[in-house]
Image (spheres, rainbow, N blue to C red):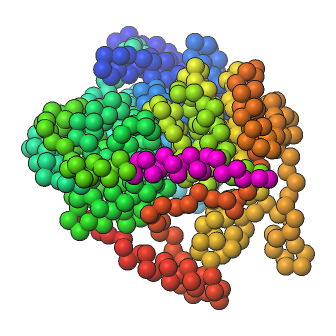
Amino acid sequence: MSTQRLTTAQAIVRFLMNQYTERDGRQQPFFAGCWGIFGHGNVAGIGQALQQEPEFPYYLPRNEQAMVHTAAAFAKMHNRLRAFACTTSIGPGATNMVTGAAVATVNRLPVLLLPGDIFARRNVAPVLQQLEFEHTPDISVNDAFRPVSRYWDRIMRPEQAIPSLLEAMRVLTSPADTGAVTLALPQDVQAEAFDFPAQLFERRVWHVARPLADRALLRQAVEWIRSSRRPLLVAGGGVIYAEATDAVARFVAQTSIPVGETQAGKGSLPFDHPQNLGAIGVTGTPGANVLAREADLVIGVGTRYSDFTTASKTAFQDPDVRFVNINVAALDAVKHAALPLVADARVTLEELAKALAGYRVPDDYAARIAQFRAQWDREVDRLYHLGKTPGPAQSEVIGAVNEVAGPRDVVVCAAGSLPGDLHKLWRARDPKGYHLEYGYSTMGYEIPGGLGIKMADPSREVFVMVGDGSYLMMPSEIVTSIQEGYRLTIVLIDNHGFASIGGLSESVGSGAFGTQYRYRDATTGQLTGEPLPVDYVANARSLGAHAAKANSIAELKAALEEARRADRTTVIVVETDPTVRVPGYESWWDVPVAEESELDAVQTARRDYVAHVTKERYFL
């Protein structure tokens, strides 16, 4: 057998360079390169290996968590058919990636993590940054990746890398199993040489299949749909990952079944499609939530039925409601005691459409769909143009960005009050035009996520919408965007704190405690003093970005147009009134309220909570 003598790190990099994916006859390199911050745990291993393979691009981020967010966003834009590797030193560099790993795994996005690890030979232990356990030497901080990785291994000998790399690729390219994959690399093993089989480094193509549903279950699904009078389709992120948006559009045009979109599934249909009721669930529209409550059949496509989608299991109230779930992951297909079609979304919808020839929802149901759509269009227009002065409402800022954005441009967000408002109000026109990280709702995702989106498709304008709370957690990748020449437009909404949790705190009777950026008041001892004077424009400029403050919607639109012509990333700061909120519509979210409290507001909120929680259901 022919061999190549390489260090373990060199073998890993050379292997990654030769991995490809193929779906529907289209092949492409799976890895676009490697992000990394070097320290003693990887500089002489993976660092040296990357240095000698310049055709495998290396990217320098400013924060280890951020680089994983960038990688996840890139993979999402490529429908999970491409990915990045991420390498760090041992210790804090590695554990900084744990949150990013959780984001990738929760959102089912492929990211390969290569953290440095303690010495395999152990004779020099404890090494710098090693966490010691008196009961076993076989644990390091990298064991923290186990619960947030879909595959985990520690490579203690060079030859162990051979089967582990193949297993890693199996998971990374699986639509059902993908997520973060962690290969912990002891720093001495990274630098150790071995005669690797040359075949390991040959071009390898991983076929991404489109599995068919079980024939008997498919026939039963057709019978259930034909017998339903109030069906509703819930479009999740799997619709977009499977490139099934056209199949959804044809299916619902044929049957007139209405569609509610999850956060990950928004963009499955253009906002103006006749069957699109918009967002569903806690952050949903009136039409989607009313018809969900009344539905006698729910067709879930590529959704994992999170609590926001199901309104904490209160969304579907018909006592005889049934579920048909189309999902490539069995874990999700069986949820809500559904008829599980464990299959590819696109081919299954095409098969259902053929079998349902002649079926349409009743005329009165179709009329209600049209009525709800017209009402919602008027409500969005109202919220886009409130005329709020001084300082616009957040809904008006969203409206301004939406009206300036082109059909293929992308809005990205992750945490705070913005995701809920965007889910309701953003008028998506392209399957990739709405990019929300809401599986893990990670503060700090927005700017590195925007960078990953722009790297995936530089032809699109990327609008990063971020609140001041999330911005302060991770603005560092502004520097990386400028270093790499990827121009972003960042709209920073300054509402002096955590507006989302502030509103939630008020709703549970706690009066926005601990959610505002204020000085400590010497009289009360609490953070209730004057607002903190944070200069976000100066901060952004110090990182190398263009920056400006917009005091009105007109100024915001002008700044957005100027940002489009800029030569680098622009940050536009807009101060909004956090008390002017987008209403909730026909939905509820389970956030337990204190059962005992001396505060009257908490006692009132508890009574409301007890009334609502009785509507939660088990689906058996």
Q: Nearer the viewer, residue 276 or 165?
A: 276
Magenta part of the chain: 372-390
Q: Is residue 294 left or right of residue 515?
A: left
Which residue is at 26% across, 52% downward?
365
Q: Is residue 37 left or right of residue 587?
A: right
Which residue is at 65% across, 39% downward?
400
Residue 19: x, y in percent? 42, 20
Which residue is at 63% across, 59% downward?
581
Count of labels shown?
0
- Residue 373 lies in the magenta-colored region: yes
Q: Is residue 305 left or right of residue 577?
A: left
Q: Main secondary structure of the magenta part?
A: helix
Residue 105: x, y in percent? 46, 45
- Quadrant where the image shows the C terminus: bottom left
Residue 303: x, y in percent? 36, 47
Identify whether 289 is placed above or below 11.
below
